[in-house]
Image (cartoon, helix red, strand yellow):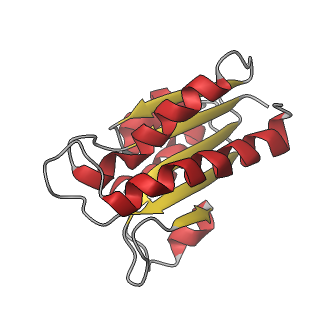
Amino acid sequence: MKTLVLGIGNTILTDDGVGCKVAQRLEERLKGHPDITVKETSLSGLSLLDEVAGYERLIIIDAIQTKSGKPGDIYKLSPEDFKIGHMAVVHDLGLFSALEMGRKLGMEMPREVVIFAIEAKDMVTFSEKLSLEVEKAIPRAVGRVMREVRRDVGFS
């Protein structure tokens, strides 16, 4: 299954960059697998269409802030989780609508979307450094994405 692992975030806004930092670590580990591409981006919504077109599966890694989460918590989510309306991910605005629009335009959009969201502590301070709690979550996030990839793609 042709899979895109996409780290989303802004690396100069403290914890908002965690998706990109996880993707950087995954890129080395997944290098050479013909069915897996790892990218990082700060794009969102309709701007993501060109990035995700042509893939069957999309694994997103991004920062999230929930009402009761602890910084560094990691959640595995699906598009259905965002229909509830109790979560606020900076980069999810319009993503699922954009994917649907891409399908209507005849673009080959991922049929399956999995989101690994890492609870952020600070997403507004200008800094390239993550908070300590979020930094410590990176190896766990890498492990969870690797297990997801191995499960469906057969990567060893």
Q: Position of residue 142 (x, y in %)?
A: 59, 45
Residue 28 is drawn in which quadrant? top right
In the rendered structure, the answer to whether residue 113 lies left or right of residue 51 reads right
Which residue is rendered at x = 24% and y = 58% of the image?
123
Q: Position of residue 21 (x, y in %)?
A: 42, 39
Which residue is rendered at x = 34% and y = 38% of the image?
43
Q: From the viewer's side, name the closer residue of 134 and 4.
A: 134
Q: From the viewer's side, name the closer residue of 139 and 90.
A: 139
Which residue is rendered at x = 66% and y = 26% of the image?
30
Quarter holding the N terminus?
A: top right
Q: Position of residue 20 (x, y in %)?
A: 41, 38
Q: Is residue 118 above or below residue 16?
A: below
Q: Give the number of marks.
A: 0
Q: From where the camera sits, is residue 54 visible?
A: no
Residue 85 is drawn in which quadrant? bottom left
Q: Position of residue 97 (x, y in %)?
A: 48, 53
Quarter holding the C terminus?
A: top right
Which residue is rendered at x = 59% and y = 61% of the image?
79
